[in-house]
Amino acid sequence: MKIATFNINNINRRLPNLLRWLQQAKPDIVCLQELKSTDKDFPIQAIGKAGYGAVWRGQKTWNGVAILARNADPVLTRTRLPGDPSDDEARYIEAAVKGILVTSLYLPNGNPQPGPKFDYKLAWFKRLKSHAAKLLKQDIPVVLAGDYNVAPTELDIYPTRSWDRDALIQPKSRAAFKSLVAQGWCDAVRSAHPTKPMFTFWDYKRNRWPRDAGLRLDHLLLSPGLAPRLTKAGVDRRIRGEEGASDHAPAWIMLK
């Protein structure tokens, strides 16, 4: 089973890129972030024609998350992260697909920091950790997939000082990610590639894609029972180089 996470950065604008990748890569499950589409504008007809069922939660202009399943309909279990009823941002969706509980999460960016946006990021992380702990107690196969907006270590960002003030690499952001993983989750891509950068994001500015000036922000965390089934993991880097591409590339895993 192939599971991927992909920050599409506007699903309707990047629809040709997405459909082409689906046809080529044939992932069984796809977790999408940054739809930048309302619920009614989600391109379900085109995605259905490509052979995928879908559940989604849209939001005008920003955010938005979805889960696609090849030749199947995901069974929706949640459309928001528990812990704050006042949080209306479309950043979390959860569904059962082919015996696995899968999330598509879009963690807050947190910039500028310090400030309210960074506080929101850390609070969101805390809520995610609390919910993740409850999922672990249920002892079911879970994949926490999505754009975490954290480059967890120095290996996950190209050599530079230009991001030093950025929320993506702050000690508190990295500590929050580390604390989540320490519950017992397996960082699948890093587990399969312990010494390679495995970037998933290259900013549009400053020629960063041609320079391979990237960061690893998109992660798939596996529950303890699922981790032994991991056989391969990677990043479809070439997708980032296509015309009209998202600034992210899909990260993926293979499970036996």
Image (spheres, rainbow, N blue to C red):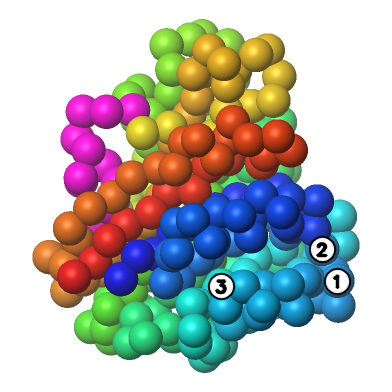
The three-letter amino acid code for the residue at tag 3 is Ile
Give the magenta part as a residue range: 184-197
Position above or below: 74 against 147: below
Q: Is residue 73 visible?
A: yes
* Horizontal and vertical percent position of residue 145: 44, 61
Q: Residue at x 77, y 71 (%)?
A: 43
The local secondary structure at tag 1 comes to loop
Residue 246 screen position, x and y as percent:
66, 41
Which residue ends up furthest to the left in the rendered image? 228
Do the residues bearing badges 1 and 3 touch, measured as CB atoms within 8 Å?
no
Quadrant in the picture for the N terminus: bottom left
The x and y percentages for residue 193 are 22, 38
Q: Is residue 82 visible?
A: no
Q: Which mark is residue 37?
A: 2
The vertical placement of 123 against 162, above or below, is: below
Residue topped by disc 3: 67
Q: CA distance from mark 3 to mark 2?
A: 14 Å
10 Å neighbourhood of mark 1: few (<14), some, or many (≥20)? some
The amino acid on which the numbered mark 2 sits, given as a three-letter code, is Ser
Q: Provide residue 187's location: percent of width, then percent of height.
A: 28, 51
Residue at 23% x, 53% y: name it. 232
Q: Which residue is mark 1?
A: 41
Q: Residue at x 35, y 65 (%)?
A: 2
In depth, the one of 129 and 191 nearer the eye is: 191
